Image (spheres, helix red, strand yellow):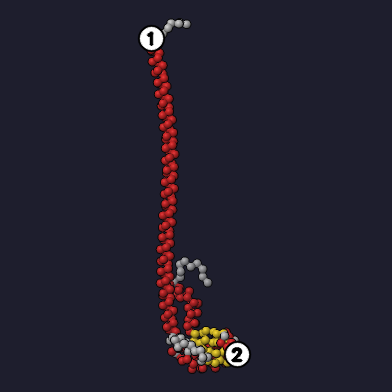
Amino acid sequence: MSNTALTDDQVDVELKKLVQFIKQEALEKAREIQIKADEEFAIEKAKLVRVEISTIDSMYERRTKQASLAQQITKSNITNKTRLRVLAARQEVLDDVFEEASKQSFEISNDSNKYCVLLKDLILEGAFVLYESTITVSAREKDYDLIKKAIPIVEDEYKEAAGFAVNITINQAQPLSAESSGGVIVQGSGGRIAVTNTLEERLTLLSEESLPAIRVAIFGESPTRKFYD
């Protein structure tokens, strides 16, 4: 092996090679670090983007649901208000029908023959309900003559059907109001029990029983009705 010492020029050349090698290593290391940093930055950036997109999607979905709910509530409110208006209008029509029927009930007593038969039937019905031997009848004072005609017929028909006699008198102490459309109130047990058979009461009962049929006749079948009696 040669032990010849390096000259200054040779040392300088070797040093330059060493420096160049170190620089090259440093540059490569720096590039690796930069690449790794860029990759990590891209990964973190992608994560942040995904988080933000998810947040925006959640916010959009929430706002969409809120908007849809608000729309449904508004639609429901409008539907309910419309339904209430329709119901109110229908009730007004029905009220007019019953009011007209009430007015016409006053004309029933104009035909005395038919009205006398009606009074007889109303008294007889009340008598059968009470099923007593002594009853009284309240009526309009102007109907007393017709009531007196009807009482003997009622007593005969009642005795034949019930098997025992009934005594019927007019309760002149408690007449029906002159404003009444007619009919009678049949009383038994000393006035403690009463069967109201006035025309107003019969009209009320009739209106309640026939209301569904009247609704159908005026407004037609309800498209939402599923069950029928």
How many C-alpha atoms fall within 10 Å of the one at disc 2: few (<14), some, or many (≥20)? some
Sort mark 1 into few (<14), some (14-19) or many (20+) by Cα contacts within 10 Å: few
Q: Give the mark, 2 or 1, whose residue is nearer the N terminus.
A: 1
List x then y, in percent, for residue 91: 43, 73
Name the amino acid type tagged 2.
Ser
Q: Residue furthest right?
A: 163
Q: Name the residue under label 2.
A: 133
Q: Which residue is drawn at 60% across and 92% down?
A: 165
Mark 2 falls on what kind of element?
Answer: loop
Side of 11 relative to 155 (left or right): left
Q: Is mark 1 on a helix, strand or loop?
A: helix
Residue drawn at x 49%, y 77% as measured from the top left: 208
Outermost front residue: 8
How many numbered marks appear? 2
Give the residue pinned by disc 1: 8
Q: At 41% across and 60% down in the image, what residue appears? A: 74
